[in-house]
Structure formats: structure tokens, C-alpha cells
Amino acid sequence: MKQSIITAFLSKTQDRFSEYQKPTGLKERLEIVQKIDGVTGVEIVFPYETEEADSTKKLMQDMGLEFAAVNANIKKETKWVPGALSRPKENLRTDAVQMIKDAKDYAIAVGAPLVTCCPLSDGYDNLFQVDYQKGWKYMIDAFAEAADYKPEMPLFVEYKINETRVNCFLDSCAKTIVFLKEVQNAATGITIDFGHALLAKENPAEILALCEQSNIDYYLHTNDNDWQFDWDLIGGSRNFLHTVEFFFYAKEFGYDKYFTADASPRIFDMLGFFREHAEMNKAIWNIVENLDRDKYRRLMHEEKHMDLMQLVRKEIYRL
């Protein structure tokens, strides 16, 4: 199990009401990562956290860290607050696509394995606000152009049911699969955020299977919430069995990318928060590694449901 952290959460964050933690530079953030056992990588946000590619690559090498991904942020700029890839104005879409292309160039330069983006501002708040058909087509065409650019660098897209829009266009795994089928580029995939799946009332383990069956690649973000809001809590702290099953299928399907912490310490001690997140993930992963997965799947096939519940009770909950 390879674990990483999104570096944005290793600095000051804010919501509508408060600011949390103190601001840090890239080097300080990486020094925090070095102090967390079991975490060897980072997902860095482009272009707001990145420094010059050569110096950043050397800094990462000197610290013994790897890139899990480069995150192209196409929602921060004022011009993209109402949307980026789906906007009627072509110049806004073009600029967003260029941002993703630049992120791909940066990822290649620093040796990152993939680029991911999360078009959260693309969607709508009011009914009769946007032309759904045209917005969907604009997004497909824009993402396809970005994906076609230097296809040796895979491009992943992250979905979320809402925030910053009341309705995000890419609001579920199934719709995102449809989206990528329309994009028609094999060098693409879905960034599956555990908490975003819960918000969409999805079963995180099931959507891994859905991607596998649909031949869609995926990259995983770990966290937890209460199914009501994207709290980005420590993984497994609220939905333990869902996390076990999520890791079960990740292991079963041979997932070999990073498990990246998309989690926010907010009021908590930052170092302690991410240490506990990493330790929780490792502990749950160890549970999964000790399960006879063939036996579990055989019992599923045989529909021996209470035998499975007995295994869950004894081997997972250990009751």
C-alpha cells in the first residue's frame, strides 16, 4: 500500500466561517510528509503550489518522496468560479484546457505518473440557468482535447455531487464513466474520492467494480464523512466496514497507484491527524491482506450470506 497526501491540506485552509492552520511553503509541507510513517508521496496542486519543475523534482528526490499525481486546479481563478470546461464562452474553455495541458507538461518534467482535475465549478445552481446539452458537449470536447495532448501522461477526472455548484455536471461515478466513454481516450480515468462516493449515496467498493467492468482506470482518494457533507475526516473513522470493503476490492483488482489522503485536519493537530489517517489505512489494509479473498468471493457466488456475515464479524470486527 502506497500512501500520499494532497499538499494543499498541509497549509492554511478556510471555509465560509473560519481559517485553519498556518500558511506553509512547499518545502515545509514536504518536511511534514517526511515525518509521517508510511507516507511516501504527494499530490501537488498546479500551478498554485508548484515551483519551477527542475528545482521541485530535485527537492522531492532529496527528500526521498514521490509524486502520486499533479492536480490541475481549474476552479480557483475568478473567471472560472462559475465554471470552466462547460462555459458557453470559448475563450474560457480554451484557457481551462491550456491549464490542464500545462499541468501535463509539468507532470512530465517532474516525473509524476498522472494528472487529475476536479471540475467542481462546472454545473448549475438554478433551474433554467444553463443549457444542459451544450454544457455537456462543451465539457466532453474540452476534456477530450486536454486528454489528446501528450497522451503518454494519463488524465483523470474527479466527480462530486455538489460544491461549488448546487449540482455538479459530473456528480456520480456512473455519469463520469459515460462522460469518459464519450471522450474516447484510453489514457483517461476517474479519480474516486471515498467521501465523494458517500455523498453521491454510492457504495465505494461497488464503484471500483463498476470501473473494472467498464474498463475505466481509477486513482483513489481516502477520507471519511457522515454521508451529508464533505468533511474530509480521517479514513475509517466513521465508515469502517465500507473502508474495509473498499480496500478489499482495491486489493482484489490489483490497484497499484497511491492511496492519496484528501483529508483536512482543520481544528486538529496537523501532524497527528495525518499520522492517524496513515495508521488507520495501514491497519485496515493489513486486515484485508489477511482475509481469504477467494473464500469471500466463493461464498458470494454460493449466496451463503450468513456465512459471510459470520466471517465479517469474526475476521473484520473480531467479535
Image: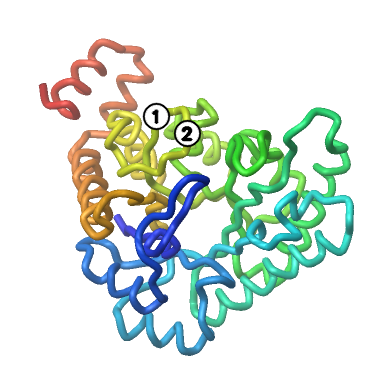
The location of residue 33, given as percent across then percent down, is 29, 68
61 in relation to 141, above or below? below
Question: Which quadrant of the structure image shows residue 233?
Answer: top left
Q: Could you tell me the amino acid type at mark 2?
A: Phe
287 in relation to 41, above or below? above
Q: Residue visible at 74% across and 50% down? A: 83
Task: Name the disc covering residue 229, or none.
Answer: 2
Evaluate if marks 1 and 2 touch, with contact meaning CB atoms under 8 Å apart: yes
Q: Residues within 10 Å of mark 1 (few under 14, many from 20)?
A: some
The quarter of the image holding the N terminus is: bottom left
Between 270 and 62, the residue placed more toward the observer is 270
The location of residue 241, given as percent across then percent down, is 29, 29
- Residue 268 horizontal side relative to residue 5, left or right: left
Q: Residue visible at 50% across and 28% down? A: 202
Q: Could you tell me the amino acid type at mark 1?
A: Asp
Residue to which mark 1 is pinned: 226
Residue that lies at the very extreme toward the front in this rendered image: 17
The location of residue 77, given as percent across then percent down, is 68, 63
Residue that lies at the very extreme toward the left in this rendered image: 319
The quarter of the image holding the C terminus is: top left
Mark 1, secondary structure of its residue: loop
Mark 2, secondary structure of its residue: loop
Q: CA distance from mark 1 to mark 2?
A: 7 Å
Q: Residue visible at 86% across and 30% down? A: 128
- Residue 215 horizontal side relative to residue 126, left or right: left
Between 305 and 127, the residue placed more toward the observer is 127
The location of residue 171, given as percent across then percent down, is 63, 36
